Amino acid sequence: MSLSVRSYAAQSATSPIAPWTFERREARPHDVVIDIKFCGVCHSDIHQARNEWSGSSYPMVPGHEIVGTVLAVGSAVTGFAVGELAGVGCMVDSCRRCAPCLAGDEQYCDKGASFTYNSTEQDRTTPTYGGYATQVVVDEKFVVHVSDKLALDAVAPLLCAGITMWSPLQHWGAKAGSKVAINGLGGLGHMGIKLGAALGAEVTVLSSGDKKRDDAKRLGAVDYVVSSDRAAMKKHAGRFDLIIDTVSADHDLNQLANLLRTDGDLVLVGVPEKPLPIKAFSLIAKRRSLSGSSIGGIRETQEMLDFCAANNLVADIETIAAEQINTAYDRMLKSDVRYRFVIDAATI
Ligand code: NAP
Ligand code: ZN
Ligand code: ZN
């Protein structure tokens, strides 16, 4: 039986996010039905709702930082029971057979993963709708366990912001003594500081203004550099092993690359609307690498959540009612969020 759910949706690239009721797809034997409690608000929600990456489909129910309780399980579900806490991040399925899927990197599925919204199920026709909603239906392979020791609303952002920073920190080997810089102190950036510091890395924040200096230190950063101050940035040339760039708008990659040591890595996770130019010499000069990283796999997401539970790590959040979502988007565009909005699903 399909499930009628309330949501907040974009009906077009220019319409505000507003209430919309729709039917979730039929639950199958391997599915978990989750009663959503909280959903984080990612900058990717804005990019996609406003069609900044092009190809958006509407109606769109954004939201891929979902936590809640299990309402029902299909007959074949073995890993979840009714009443348990559960989380869903940016993906709800993948082909499960290609090399990246078998390696646990479902986000890089050769056939194309099914993303939580603005995407389709693996049948390539059934649209997916995200977490600004009262319930969601997801195959248990794409559902993760959430600790009851952490504040549930503050866990939600770990499902995207957390894993998106954790995965490159792991892949590029951030550890005790590593010199890591995080560019942009927003939802992703603040989780990058917390996770990097918890792994023992020396984390420096690069921020466009001076307003977040005290926060950066409180979150665990050892240093803070104002990226709009070119002279200040030059002083740190050649300093970092790894820079993770979370900035969502136009900015200068050459200035960032210059901060890397020989063989250092600049990893893009932010997705600005327009291409960013890079000078060959910015990389050639010190055999630097420019890479990108997309969220993280399901197993890795569970490892990150377990690490956060063991280290008492959650996001810094501002909980909002669903009807405040358009104001929240406007504030995020002004970098006015400390550091993640989370929708209380009871208000939908
Ligand atoms: P956010 O909370 O809005 O933070 C973005 C930060 O970028 C801002 O806080 C700001 O930091 C900086 N910034 C914004 N506009 C800027 C500008 N014009 N110049 C310089 N800095 C600017 O966004 P988020 O949710 O962290 O997401 C960041 C980006 O990552 C988005 O593009 C999003 O789509 C992308 N994303 C990618 C993945 C992935 O898998 N790769 C996953 C999730 C999100 P300061 O105030 O410190 O300058
Ligand atoms: Zn996201
Ligand atoms: Zn695959």
Image (spheres, rainbow, N blue to C red):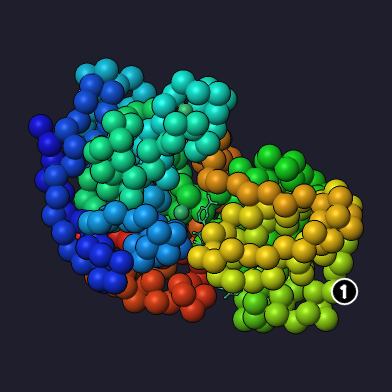
Q: Does 180 sit above or below residue 70?
A: below
Q: Quadrant of the C terminus?
A: bottom left
Q: Find disc 1 in the rendering and name its residue.
A: 235
Front residue of 205/106: it is: 106
Count of marks, rendered view: 1
Q: Is residue 199 left or right of residue 140?
A: right
* Kind of residue indicated by mark 1: Lys
Which residue is rendered at x = 24% and y = 53% of the image? Answer: 133
Pointer 1: residues within 10 angstroms few (<14), some, or many (20+)?
few
Q: Quadrant of the N terminus?
A: top left
Which residue is rendered at x = 44% and y = 36% of the image? Answer: 112
Can residue 39 be seen in the rendering of this structure?
A: no
Residue 299 pos. (x, y %): 52, 31
Front residue of 331/217: it is: 331
Which residue is rendered at x = 59% and y = 63% of the image? Answer: 275
Residue 333 pos. (x, y %): 46, 75
Q: Quadrant of ligand 1?
A: bottom right
Residue 37 pos. (x, y %): 29, 51
Check disc 1 and report its element: helix, strand or loop: loop
Residue 31 occupies which quadrant of the picture?
Answer: top left
Residue 69 occupies which quadrant of the picture?
Answer: top left
Residue 189 pos. (x, y %): 60, 61
Q: Is residue 85 left or right of residue 208?
A: left
Label 1 lies in ligand 1 vicinity (Cβ under 8 Å): no
Front residue of 112/248: it is: 112
Q: Is residue 27 left or right of residue 291?
A: left
Can residue 126 be seen in the rendering of this structure?
A: yes
Which residue is rendered at x = 57% and y = 59% of the image? Answer: 270
Q: Is residue 305 left or right of residue 204?
A: left
Q: Does 242 sit above or below residue 273?
A: above
